[in-house]
Image (cartoon, helix red, strand yellow):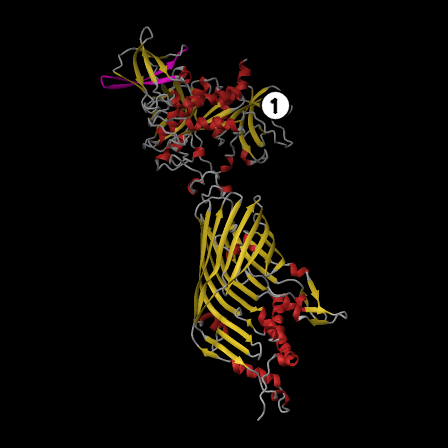
Amino acid sequence: MQPFINLSVTSFRPTFLLRARLRSFGILALVFSLFLLQTKTSFAQLDATMYHMSTIPQLKNTNPSSTCDYKVYVGIPAISSIYADVHYNGFVITDLLKKRSDDSLYLDMDNAISKMGKQNIIGGAFQLDWLLLGWGKEQNRFFINITEKAFFRFRYPKDLMRLLWEGNATFIDDAADLSGLAIRGTLYREHAFGYAREINDKWTLGGKLKYLYGILNVSSKVKELSLYTTPNTYDLVGQSDMVLNTSFIEEDDGSSLVDNLLYKTGNHGLGIDLGATYKATEKWTISLSMIDLGFIRWKNNATNYSNDLDQVAFRGNAITTFIDSTNTNPFGTIADSLAITFDNFKETNNSYTDGLQTRFYLGGTFNINETNKVGGLIHAEYFRKKLYPAFTLSYNYRIVRWLGASISYSIMNRSYFNLGIGLSGNLGPIQIYVVSDNIAYLFNMAKFTGGGVFPQKAKTAQLHVGLNLTFSKNEKDRDKDGIIDKKDECPDDPGPEEYNGCPDRDGDAIIDIKDDCPDDPGPAIYKGCPDRDGDKVIDKEDKCPDVPGSVDNHGCPLKLHLLGPKRDTSITADINEDGFFVFENLPSSRSYLFALEADNADMVEEVQVLKTLDGLETILTATKEENGYFLYTEFLKQETRLFLIDAKGDTLMMAEMNDEGFFVFQPLPADMSHLFLLDAAEDQLKDEILILLIDDEGNEKVIHATQDGTNIFRYEYIPPKAAADLDLMVEEDVPVILLEEEKEILNTAFENLEFNSGSDIISFGSFKSLQELSDLLLKKPDWRIKLSGHTDDIGSTTSNLLLSKKRAEAVKSVLINRGVNANNVIVKYYGETKPIESNTTNEGRQRNRRVEMLIIQAEDYVDPSDSSGDINGFENETGLWFRVQILTSDNKIDLADAKFKGIKNVEEYFDNGLHKYTSGKSTDFNQLNKVMLPALKKKGFKQAFIVAFKDGKRIPVSDALKLLND
């Protein structure tokens, strides 16, 4: 019988250990080669540097409550976020690879093992975004991503390496504790929707809900795993309770691997990210988050390998295993015996659940200013009941819309030399970024003979790069009202978006900064101030806030007192809404004397009195006397009559002014010229009168007859011309460029101008601004003002034309009464023909009822910017001359042109940048006015007019006439 020899591993240590060394080196070489390979192609683990980089949207992968600098961002598919890392917390490469004196290499495994910790971990990760989209609205942020993720973790105890390298001699009467052994590798796809909200000016909360689509998994659960060596017999006693699970996709049914990856996996799971940010002060912010808390239920091709040993012993092999000449592999025989002894693996195919690699972050920042901040971060990863912490400090810098940068220092993976850097740059909406938690290994390389350059000290390598489209910068909002400061009219006081971030305390729809009465509601027309008596005077300026009054009387009623013989008040009347002082049952008298009680009484030239007596109403106009009282005296007015006369002066027809203010002639055709003689008081003479002509067929037409310097008025009929080129007269009004304060005076006069209803009587509220306008014109005697009257379309066309004329003339009268030169006030009137708004609404009609005001240069104004070589007038001419100007053109016209056919003595002069043409030359104004001018108008020059020259230079006609009279 062949003897059985109890052989312990240590009994044959030199030989057995040689085999063990070879086996262990093979395992380590495989693992370490994988490590080196990953170091070359992959990169970091926790995105610690990115955590505080608000310029990069992907920082939300580390904390969903983080605020990105952009309201809207879109990731470029497949390249918006490419992330990879590898990390190892055991030895570094220079602990294992050593050089001899001859530069040859050897493996110092003993030294490498001595550098290991009790538990050591090697890991890596890779992820790629297929879809990334984020947007914000007010205090809300939304974000979506579809991401391919892969991670691998392998943890091994130091005892395992010692056992494999040194054998079991080190563990005599001791157990090699291998229970820390663990592995997890997962490939899955994440579909996530995230939401964050600024709860108030301190707290922001965020979360992300994720649907997980599992593709590949290998994971272990080790409850117990140990190997004990008995002290005397050196038996190996093993004990284990462990499970290894795997799940993967197989190609079947002819489907491609891609189809299986996308559509046919049955592995589903859920995950969640949670985060919170607390703004302690304007400078300090604290944040925390938990990332990838979740699980996947693995069903696809699930396989479970379990091993359960309870005190199983291996007592060795017979010595003949080594001395038998027929056994060529004795150590293989021993290994097989060990495998048989400890092999208790059971294989099943049950689905199982495995978790994700959950990470935790606790961070804080100190904002130095708008562009610089310092950050601190404690971050950790949880793997198989053990937490792996790390710490990072960072300095962060940003230039809004252009650049973000970060430099970080980290302690992680039992390494104190981890220098990170992050950069993001924008070119318009295109953003590219590069971030790494450790770039130190790039500057600490060792080159070994035989191939390869490897990091000497690094235990972590990581890189995160990508390309985004970023829009709508998330800018500062100090008052947290959802409106960024640069668009917030009140950045320190919260207010709604409809008011551009400004508060409205009294709720009158007028923001406080523009509200003159922010605590008392009022309409916009009064800048937010109330007017409880509705008299258009705000309460705080109204001396009679509960009694309606006049704007120009501090809100108190305007009163007109009828004075008795001793100038004492006998009757008092208030003004009505139509602008009349109403005296009921006013005693009959040929004369009344009134005193006006108003703050601006000195500006008022006349008042309108509505007298009622026995049911009859009469309007009286009282005019101001030198003593300031208003006097009405009844007198028999001279009848105003207009005679149609012939060239000899004989009367053909006569008409009186009707109630509307027209002289009506019927029948009288409008298609021929007419001559009229006005029989009226001197103060009734106007430069122009309106005449209503009615022909035999009843057609009405209003014509304009102009005064020729006496009480003779002419109407020149201009027949239609086939050639429109005769009408070359251009507008010669040259506007004055006003200063801002001058514009304000003119605009105020225009906006405040009101008339008594249906009349040409100016309301009291208009006089103050007209006085300011008069003062301005008196300071500028060379200026002229053109008043253009307009009406709405209520009423007849003829009555509106007359009303627009009367109203413009009424304004002219006010200005003249205040000292403005009558020759400097030009009146135009258009009735309803030139609306600026539709007449279909009350607002439109109100805007159309207006007297426009335009300040224009003097008639002889010469444009100083004119640099042409033409003479502005008639060179070398002396004396005072009148001419009839017939044409004005932007371009020079040949005097032989057909336009001037039949016209004698046509001359050209240059003025205000225009070419101007005259006919006739005389020192007799009346001769030109009565003969030459009408003749030229009949020839088609319907806009011809008289101009005057002194010593060849054009002067106002009024000045020329004064010179003649003098």
In the rendered structure, which amino acid carries the disc numbered 1? Answer: Gly
* Quadrant, the N terminus: bottom right
Q: Looking at this rendering, what residue extends furthest in the right direction?
A: 102
Does the image show residue 761? no
Q: Quadrant of the C terminus?
A: top right
Residue extending farthest left: 614
Residues rendered magenta in the picture: 606-626
**Is 615 inside the magenta-drawn segment?**
yes
Q: Is residue 457 left or right of residue 736?
A: right
Relative vertical location of residue 568 with respect to residue 657 in this rendering, above or below: above
Residue at which label 1 appears: 952
- Identify the image quadrant of residue 787: top left
Q: Position of residue 528 (x, y in %)?
A: 40, 32
Q: Residues within 10 Å of mark 1 (few under 14, many from 20)?
A: some
Expressed as whole percent of the image width and height from the top left, the position of residue 854 reads 48, 28
Give residue 710's position: percent from left, percent from top.
Answer: 45, 18
Instruction: Measuring from the top left, give residue 796's x and y in whole percent.
Output: 33, 31
**Residue 286 visible in the picture:** yes
- Report whether 734 appears left or right of 804: right
Instruction: Please tell me in which quadrant of the rendered image residue 556 appears.
Output: top left
Main secondary-structure element of the magenta-colored stretch:
strand
- Which residue is most to the front? 232
Q: Up-down: is 271 above or below 349?
A: above
Question: Of 933 and 451, which appears nearest the observer?
Answer: 451
80 part of magenta stretch? no
* Picture layout, residue 418 above or below residue 240: above
Q: Nearer the viewer, residue 746 or 854?
A: 746
Q: Residue at x 60, y 57 (%)?
A: 411
Question: Which residue is more in the foreground, 347 or 326?
Answer: 326
Q: Nearer the viewer, residue 963 or 136?
A: 136
Please tell me whether mark 1 sits on a helix, a strand or a loop. loop
